[in-house]
Amino acid sequence: MTANLSNLVYPGFEAIPRYWNREHECMTARVDPGEYYISCQDEYIFTRLGSCIAACIWDPVMHIGGLNHFLLPERKAHDDWHQLTSYSCRYGNWAMEKLINSILSAGGQRRNLKAKIFGGAKLGGMSIINVGESNIEFVRQYLALEGIEILAEDVGGIWPRKVMFHPKSGRAMVKRLASEPVERTIREEKEYLDGVKITGADNEIELFDN
C-alpha cells in the first residue's frame, strides 16, 4: 500500500502506528498499553491484552468509534493508598474519558454510544495479574455510570487476547492466545505501569460471536 493515508487520521493520533491489513484490505491502527485511537474510516484497530482492558466504544448512527487500552495498578504495588487512587484515575478514568470525549468531539452523540469490552485476564502466578478482576469491575461500573450499554464482552479467564475492532461498524473480533505469549504480555504490562512504551503487533484474529 503506497498511498498516503495520513489525511484519514484525526489530529492528535498521527503517532499511532498504522499498517495495511491484507486480510481485510484496509488500514489497521495498533494501540499499545496506555494509548487510544478513534476513527470514522473503514479501518480496524488492533491491540493485544493480558490483565489490561480494551473498551471498544462507538456511535452506530454517526459511524465513529474507538478503542483504548489501560491497566489499573494493583494495591500492593504501592505503599500509599492515595497514590494508588491517583494512578487509578490516571489510567482508568483518563483512558475512558479521553476515548469518549474524543468520539463526541468528532461528531458522536452520547445517547447513541455502545460498548464492547475485552481483557482482564489472570495470567500465571506473578503479582501483576491480580488486577485483572479489578479492571473488569472498573470498566463495567464506569460504563454503567455513563449510561453506555455493553453489547458484548470477552473478559476474565486465563488467556491473553488479540482484539480487532472496526470503529465504523462496531464489529469486534478476538482471539484467545495459547500460553506461549503469557510471559511477554506480563512483561509489557509491567513496563507499561513503569511508564515504558512497548510496541509490537500481529494481526491473527478470530471472530468473536456476540
Image: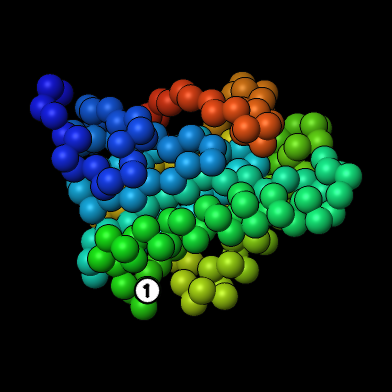
Is residue 10 positioned above or below 18 on the image? below
Q: Quadrant of residue 136?
A: bottom right
Q: Position of residue 174 (x, y in %)?
A: 45, 43
Q: What colour-coding does the image apply?
A: rainbow
Q: Which residue is mark 1?
A: 110
Q: Residue at point 18% right, 42% down? A: 8
Q: Position of residue 209 (x, y in %)?
A: 41, 53
Is residue 129 positioned above or below 103 on the image? above
Is residue 35 positioned above or below 97 on the image? above
Q: Residue at point 51% right, 58% down? A: 96
Q: Is residue 179 left or right of residue 94?
A: right
Going by the numbered disc 1, the residue's amino acid type is Arg
Q: Residue at point 58% right, 67% down? A: 142
Examine the rendering and report whether any part of residue 116 can be seen: no
Other residues around mark 1 within 10 Å, as few (<14) / some (14–19) / many (≥20): some
Q: Position of residue 49 (x, y in %)?
A: 55, 38
Q: Is residue 128 left or right of residue 156?
A: right
Task: Count the labels in the image.
Answer: 1
Q: Residue at point 29% right, 67% down? A: 108
Quarter of the figure with the C terminus: bottom left
Examine the rendering and report whether any part of residue 95 can be seen: yes
Q: Residue furthest right?
A: 79
Q: Is residue 133 left or right of residue 160?
A: right
Q: Is residue 184 left or right of residue 35?
A: right
Is residue 29 positioned above or below 101 on the image? above
Determine whether the residue tagged by mark 1 lies in a helix, strand or loop: helix
Q: Position of residue 93 (x, y in %)?
A: 58, 59
